Image (cartoon, rainbow, N blue to C red):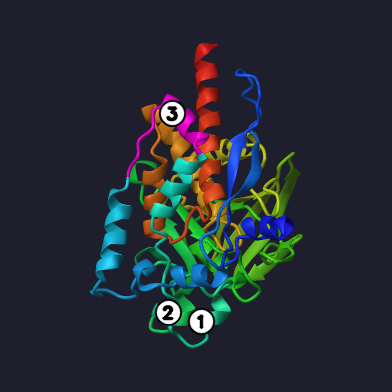
Amino acid sequence: MLDKIMNDLMDLEAEPQTPVFDLSLDTRTEGDITTLSVTPVGLQERRGSNVSLTLDMCSPGCTEPYGYGAQLSPRDQTAKEYLREGTNTLTPSQLHTRAIDDQALQAEFYETPMNFVDPKEYNYPGLVRKNRYKTILPNAHSRVILRTADEDEFLSTYINANYLQGYGGEERAYIATQGPTVNTVGDFWRMVWQERCPIIVMITNLEEKNEKCAEYWPEDSVTHEGIEIKVVTVTQEDDYSLRVFTLKFGGEERSLRQYWYTSWPDQKTPDKAPPLLELVEEVEQARAEAPPTSGPVIVHCSAGIGRTGCFIATSILCKQLRSEGVVDILRTTCQLRLDRGGMIQTGEQYQFVHHVLSLYEKQLSHIVEE
C-alpha cells in the first residue's frame, strides 16, 4: 500500500492522487549547508477519494472561463480574490521555522485555490490530441497563442502553455508548458521560435512508468515546421545534461540551450536541494548572457504544473531573497496559479520549496559571514 501511495505522490498526472506526507529535515549539524533531505515519515492526510479530487479539480469554483466578459460565480470570485491578495512574507528566521512546520504548510497549501480550468471551457473538436492530460489546460488570459495565417482556426493557434510573471512583476518571464507529445512537437518548436526563447528547462524523464514527454529534439538535426534544429554540443553534468542547438528559419539563425534536469527522482521530491539550486543559478546566468531581444525561458515537466511550478517559484524566490532579504512563497504561488492553474501541484512540493529556500538563505548567510 505504501508503494502505491508513493507512486501516486509525485507522478504528476493530470488527475493527481495526492496523499500528503509529513516531511522533515535530516538531523544534521547546524553548519551543514551542503545537503538537505526530505523524508516521508507517515501518511497525514488524504483529501477524499481519487474521484472527489478529480471532480474538485474541474469544479466551477476552480475554473478560468474561456473568452472575455464571462461572469464569475461567487465561489470563483472568492478564489480569484484570494489568489490576487494572498501573502505571507517571511523573514529568514521565520522561513527556517516555517520550513519544518508541516501542519502549517499543508494547511496553507490546501487553503490556496488551484485555479484549474474547467475542460468544458475548451470544447473544440480535435483539441484532445493537443493535450497530454485532459484536465490540465491553459488558463485563457495568459495562454500562448501561436501565430498562423488563419487565426480563426483555433486548433492551429493552440498550445498547452502559459506566460508567467517573473520576479518584480516582470511580464512573460517564463512559459510553463506540458511535455510535448508526438502530436505537438511541431507546435512546441513553433512556440520556441515565435517567442524567441533562449532556454528550455526540462524536468522529467521521457518515461516514468508511462510516457511523460516525447523526445522532441534530434540526435543530430531535424526540421519541424520549417525550423531547422541542429545539435551543436552535448555536455553531461552530474545532475543535468546541457544541449546547445542552432535554430534556423527564414534566413535567421539563433542559439538555444536545453537543460535536462535528471536528478528529480520518479515518484517523489528530490532528497537534496543543492542540485536544484545549482540549476536555478546556471539558468539565471545563461538568461543574463542571452541576447537582449530574447524572450521567455520555457520550463516543462510532464503536465507543466508540478515540478515546473517548483522550479519557477524557486527561481523567483531566490531573487526576492537576495534583493529584499525576505521571501513570500504564498504570494509567488498565488501569482503562478493565476497564470497557470495548479502550479506547485502537491503539498509535498510546497514543503520542498520552503526547504529549498531555507537552505538557500543559509548559504547566503554563510557567504556573508565569510
Secondary structure at badge 1 equals helix
| Amino acid type, mark 2 | Tyr
N-terminal label among 1 and 3:
1
The answer to which image quadrant residue 325 occupies is: top left
Q: Residues within 10 Å of mark 3 (few under 14, many from 20)?
A: few
Secondary structure at badge 2 equals helix
The answer to which image quadrant residue 304 occupies is: bottom right
Please name the residue that numbered disc 1 is placed on. Answer: 127
Please name the residue that numbered disc 2 is placed on. Answer: 122
| Amino acid type, mark 1 | Leu
Residue at x-position 45% and y-position 31%:
95
N-terminal label among 2 and 3:
2
- Image height check: is 307 above or below 326? below
Q: Is residue 31 left or right of residue 87?
A: right
Q: Of 252 and 341, which appears nearest the observer?
A: 341
* Horizontal and vertical percent position of residue 53: 50, 67
Write the start and end of the magenta stretch as one range.
87-101
* Horizontal and vertical percent position of residue 168: 34, 41
Residue at x-position 69% and y-position 59%:
7
Q: Of 361 and 38, which appears nearest the observer?
A: 38
Gap in Å between the C-alphas at discs 1 and 2? 8 Å
Please name the residue that numbered disc 3 is placed on. Answer: 322
